[in-house]
Amino acid sequence: MDPFTALADPVRRDLLRALASGPARVVDLAARHPISRPAVSKHLRLLAEAGLVTAEDRGRERHYALARSGLAPVRALLDELAGRRAPIPESAFDALDLEVRRTVHDRRTGADTGTGRPQEESA
């Protein structure tokens, strides 16, 4: 399930709001809703499949926590709709660094004069 589908349900959105303040047990999350504990567990399983929550077994209890990184696609869409530019990806900086290093190397060795041809040596 993708994050957008997972967020479409009001119960799942409420579960995420509850988990935003910290990890919680299924029993505690179920106590907040007028639906059964198995139904809450199913909602939590769907949120986990969407990458929005993580689950950790502690003895006989399962604790869920908000996976904030799972909200990245939603955040990106909202930023796009709001007209905000996405941050420059790290790979762009890697490519820029490589180009700068190549240019510096070429200038030091006199391999390129900017014309695309090797620099001729003067006698």
Image: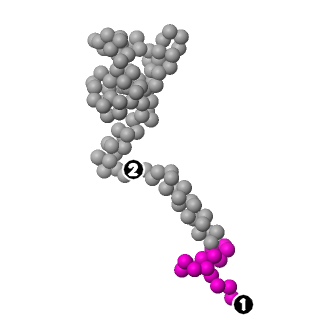
For residue 4, side relative to residue 63 (left or right): left
Q: Residue at x 60, y 66 (%)?
A: 102
Q: Is residue 70 above or below residue 17?
A: below
Asked which secondary structure carries label 2, the reply is loop
Examine the image and state in which quarter residue 44 appears: top left
Asked which secondary structure carries label 1, the reply is loop
- How many other residues sit within 10 Å of disc 1, few (<14), some (14-19) or many (≥20)? few
Horizontal and vertical percent position of residue 34: 28, 12
113 in the magenta segment: yes
Name the amino acid, label 1. Ala
Q: Which residue is mark 2?
A: 86
- Which residue, as the protein is rendered here, is positioned at the far bottom? 123
Q: Which residue is mark 1?
A: 123
For residue 18, side relative to residue 34 (left or right): right
**Range of the magenta residues?**
107-123
Name the amino acid, label 2. Ala
